[in-house]
Image: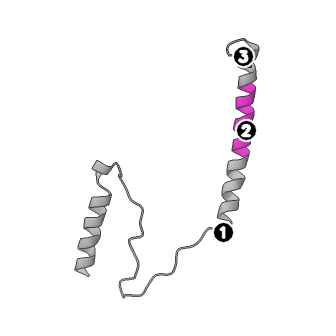
Amino acid sequence: MAAVSVVRRFVCRSVCSPQLGLQQLQHRTAVNTATGAILAKPKKTAFGLLRIMTVVAPFLYVGTLISKNFAALLEEHDIFVPEDDDDDD
């Protein structure tokens, strides 16, 4: 048991070192109870991909609307007007 804690400390120090830019590493530290029984599996988030898409899709749409309107505003005020280069060479 003591060897496991020594190895765990060594791995955490080497992986979580500030030289690598990693301040904190997420990992499950408890795998078993004090009596030796194995803990249950962590809960899995149901509909994870669906939840991600319901958040990402509307914000992508709103972001494209904002950028489209801002580009139209810039062109309207002649701040940025793309040049029409008709080089057919």
Question: Residue type at mark 2?
Answer: Val
Residue beneath disc 2: 62
Q: Nearer the viewer, residue 13 or 30?
A: 13
Query: Callout 3 environment at 10 Å: few (<14), some (14 to 19), or many (20+)?
Result: few
Query: Callout 1 environment at 10 Å: few (<14), some (14 to 19), or many (20+)?
Result: few
Q: Position of residue 24 (x, y in %)?
A: 37, 56
Question: Residue type at mark 1?
Answer: Ala
Q: Position of residue 77 (x, y in %)?
A: 73, 12
Q: Earlier in the sequence, mark 3 or mark 2?
A: 2
Q: Earlier in the sequence, mark 2 or mark 1?
A: 1
- Residue 15 lies in quadrant: bottom left
Q: Looking at the image, do the residues carrying marks 2 and 1 touch, with CB atoms under 8 Å apart? A: no
- Disc 3 versus disc 2: nearer the observer: 3
- Disc 1 versus disc 3: nearer the observer: 3
Of helix, strand and loop, which one carries label 1?
loop
Separation (CA) of disc 3 from disc 2: 32 Å
Residue 84 is left or right of residue 52, and the answer is right
Magenta stretch, residue numbers? 58-70
Separation (CA) of disc 1 from disc 3: 53 Å
Q: Residue at x 23, y 78 (%)?
A: 3
Residue beneath disc 3: 85
The residue sitting at the top extreme is 78
Dominant secondary structure of the residues highlighted in magenta in the image: helix
The residue sitting at the front extreme is 89
Residue 15 is left or right of residue 27, and the answer is left
Q: Earlier in the sequence, mark 1 or mark 3?
A: 1
Residue beneath disc 1: 46
Q: In the image, is residue 62 part of the stretch drawn in magenta?
A: yes
Q: Position of residue 89 (x, y in %)?
A: 71, 19
Question: Residue type at mark 3?
Answer: Asp
Q: Nearer the viewer, residue 31 or 68?
A: 68
